[in-house]
Amino acid sequence: MNVWMSLQDPNTQWVLFGCMLLGLSGGVLGSFAFLRGRSLMGDALAHAALPGVCLVYLLTGSKSVGLFLIGAAIAGLVATTCITAITRHTRIKEDTALAITLSVFFGIGIVLLTFIQHSPTGNQSGLDKFLFGQAASLVSGDVTQMIIVSIVLLSITTLLFKEFTLLTFDPGYGRGLGFPMGLLDSLLMLMLLTAVVIGLQAVGVVLMAAMLIAPAVTARYWTDRLSSMVILAGLFGALSGMLGTLFSTQVENLPTGPMIVLAATCFFLFSLLFSPRRGLLFRLLRFLRLRKTILEEDVLCALYEWFELSPAHFLKGCSPESLMEKSGKPLRTLRRALLALQRKGMVDYRKSGGEQPGWIFTAAGLQHAHQLILNQRLWDLYWMNEQQYQALSIDPNKGDFVGQLVPEQLAPILRDLDSYGLTPKLSAIPHPVITRIDQKRKGVSV
Amino acid sequence: MKGISNASPLTVHDLTVAYQKKPVLRNVSLTIPEGKLIGIIGPNGAGKSTLIKAIQGLVPVASGQTQIYGKPYKQQRKLVGYVPQRETVDWDFPTNALDVVLMGRYGKLGWFRRPGKHDRQLSLQCLQKVGMSDYADRQISQLSGGQQQRVFLARALAQEAQLYFMDEPFAGVDAATEKAIIQLLTELKVQQKTVLVVHHDLQTVEEYFDWVIMLNRRIIAAGPTQEVFTTENLHKTYGGRLQHLGAVLSSSPDAVLPEEEPL
Amino acid sequence: MNTLWIILTGALVAASCGFLGCFLILRRMAMLGDAISHAVLPGIVLAFLVSGSRDTLPMLIGAMVAGLLTVFLIQSLHQSGVKTDAAIGVTFTALFSIGVVLVSLYTQQVDLDLDCVLYGEIAYVPWDTWQWGTMDMGPRAVWLIGGVFLLSLLTVGLFYKEIKLCSFDPAMAAAVGIPVLFFHYLLMGLVSLATVASFESVGAILVVAMLVVPAATAYLLTDRLPVMLFLSMGAGILSAGGGYLLATWLDSSIAGAMTAVAGLLFLLSFVFSPRYGLVAKALARRRFRYE
């Protein structure tokens, strides 16, 4: 209810709208910056704005926001030029160039700020508010300005989307196609700068940097396509802007800017942990499952190949020790895998009268192992004669070989396999004894 | 470094490395003889560099153990020398060639001790062995690619290890460097050191190495070069990607599968 | 006398940040200084709220914890696949926001001037003295920063070769058994400590500048790490002195002026460095063309 009430307030509406727009353009432009490896550029540009703002005030004596924006933009351009010059002409790396420019510009800004403060005519109050941001004090005029700038930025992005895509992924190739990559890069920089400058008065220096980074990184967790990433980042940005603003209206003294950043950070943390494809949790689960699958497959194959070499033992079973020798795996790991396979009904532990007990295949296990071995040997065969099989257009990145082919295609390859003497020697059709044991086992367990 | 033990310089048991969705190395088991020059060959993406990194514990493994002279790797670090790929470091680092070679002594020195006169002398000798003594004072960014590689080799020499891992030392080097590396490898062999080299150029395998490990995500074959470096195995390692097998094998023996081959 | 104290404080900050900064820029973590200096804010505020006083020790501890937390978070994010610069950006802005929120919420209890934290007021240093018994030991900041300076000098001196190897070739360092991660945290801990100790007296901006600018200046002047360390300290101290003069002349912020002078020194070496400067390079190119 309370949220609804505060939404009725036109002031809040303006602030809300402004912050959402800011988040939107921050997310969209931040995506390109992030992919270009320039996430911290926003931070540097935002700091570099200070001397520009102070100089404008020193020169004109007015505190008009429009003039401040121009001053900030010019200072930002100079700063970008400095960063580029430092990285191009020396062995200093980009991060250092960024840090140098950021701190020196801000330092100069502070010198100017205090100079204004101490000079008889000066009164610097208002200048720093401009830099540190006060979203709550946004008025309709500021927001109109934001709307215009955001629409311009977003339209340019839409129009030049293809070109910016080239710029982020392969500038060299883009140049080859005849696009002026240097110019596009500068344009992107300028747009970034504009976004930073309009964001300054709402959320301030540091927090504007966050709006360019967090939504973009968050979006990266949910998609691998640039177009959807840009849209998602815009959405996350707008959503953070909305949640942050709403939350800060609910509690007294809660500043809007930091709340927006914290909302964006929460989105990021959630994605980092739980995004299905790249999130930490699912990555860990996938890794553990993969490890288990590999182990079980290795053991099945080792068992199969052991039986191939000593077919006489097929019904008597293989002792864990021989399997250890065959597979090279430690006994304990082996036991664990065998027990897991037993639970899945792939292998069984058989005690036949008077003889040493051993592990045998069940019907299902034999079939599975046969498939695995066949698949593996077919791959070996494929690699041996890749040219010959080129017509089959097999995808080497897939694990499954048999499944990629129709039976007519497979038949000649199986003949080739036989000519190398590599056909799996144990038939996939279970031995009658095994079928009997299987049935007995199932009968007992039921 | 005499009388370490009779154990093999390197045994690997059931090593599996998996990134994300696929195993990069699967079920690798190896026992390496002492005093041999060993080439690790295989196509791109076969996991050659991953193998030597996994053995040294530089990448996380899904399963497996490695032993150096019969003891776990961690206890035997001082016996191992490593030559990483040249691109892994920042050559703009403010230091000179001799200094980089001296870094090879750090593991032996232990905590708090500074490299002394002996270390300096030894490092200079190592630079000399790779034909770089004239460049000892040269800033490392001003060395050519081959010279940088030789500095790395000299650093490995300064480690005075028993077992060396080299990650593509021949990649993109000039003829002089290649010759220097070969000379060095031969000398190491004379000293009964064991050297594992990730190698790309199949033409030179027979000439350079006594032993080969053929790798394509799993071990295709491992053993003395004459026995293992066969058309059959090359086919299986590289598949149809290799066009002129006849040129690679100087005396192509009949395709006989070695006994290690688990088929 | 006051002038001397102020310059001494600035010089100590410059020296300790300068030589730690060399390792920062060599490990491509230059923005870490900026990140830490912002991210310590919640630590300071929390320490203030918990202890209820403006004593140095609790604030120092709070900021130190926050600084190390920043480093830890950045490292963890990086290891879980986030690009370094994005990891830095997300971490410090989030922590800084928490700090600002805390300040705003407890604005009655917290008598912290945000401006003061950001710009610092080095001019007040001489008046905040340390009384030991009845003796006046001189400004507290000088003792504090001096202590940090000595500590970092000692640590880097003791572990020089390990830190150097970790910076140059972490893979090899790990292979020979040097605990690379431990040294990462040790170094970053020192950076946090230097940031935090300098904070109160000189403000964040001077710290960030001194962490990178003198080191980068030195990096353009020499090819030897030890020389670079000393040059970096020298450039820092020079900026402190020059900055003070500039500030008195302009009647402006001393910390800001010191930063500006540091920037000027960098510019000079950028243009005139005997080997890597613009002029030297242009001359070399010209000679090359004639030959």
Image: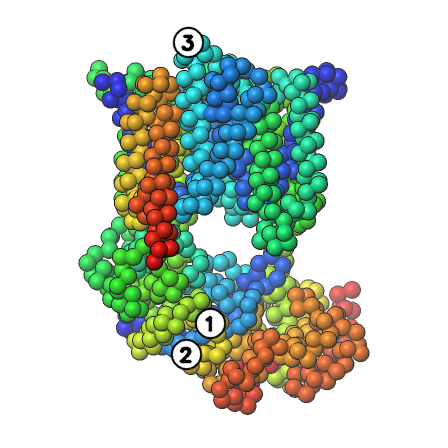
Q: Quadrant of the C terminus of chain B?
A: bottom right
Q: Position of residue B177 (x, y in %)?
A: 37, 70
User: Can you identify the residue that label 1 sits on?
Assistant: B199
Residue C162 can be seen in this image: no
Colour scheme of the picture: rainbow
User: Can you identify the residue that label 2 sits on?
Assistant: B208
Q: What chain does badge 1 belong to?
A: B
Furthest residue toward front: C290
Q: What chain does badge 3 belong to?
A: A
Q: Residues within 10 Å of mark 1 (few under 14, many from 20)?
A: many
Q: Quadrant of the N terminus of chain B?
A: bottom left
Marks 3/1: CA distance?
74 Å
Nearer to us: label 3 or label 1? 3
Q: Earlier in the sequence, mark 1 or mark 2?
A: 1
Residue at left offset 39%, top offset 72%: B175
Using residue B239 as the reference point, say whether residue C200 is left or right of it: left
Q: Amino acid at mark 1?
A: His
Q: Position of residue B256 (x, y in %)?
A: 55, 88
Task: Answer whether labels 1 and 2 touch (C-beta < 8 Å).
Answer: yes
Residue at left offset 45%, top offset 46%: A88
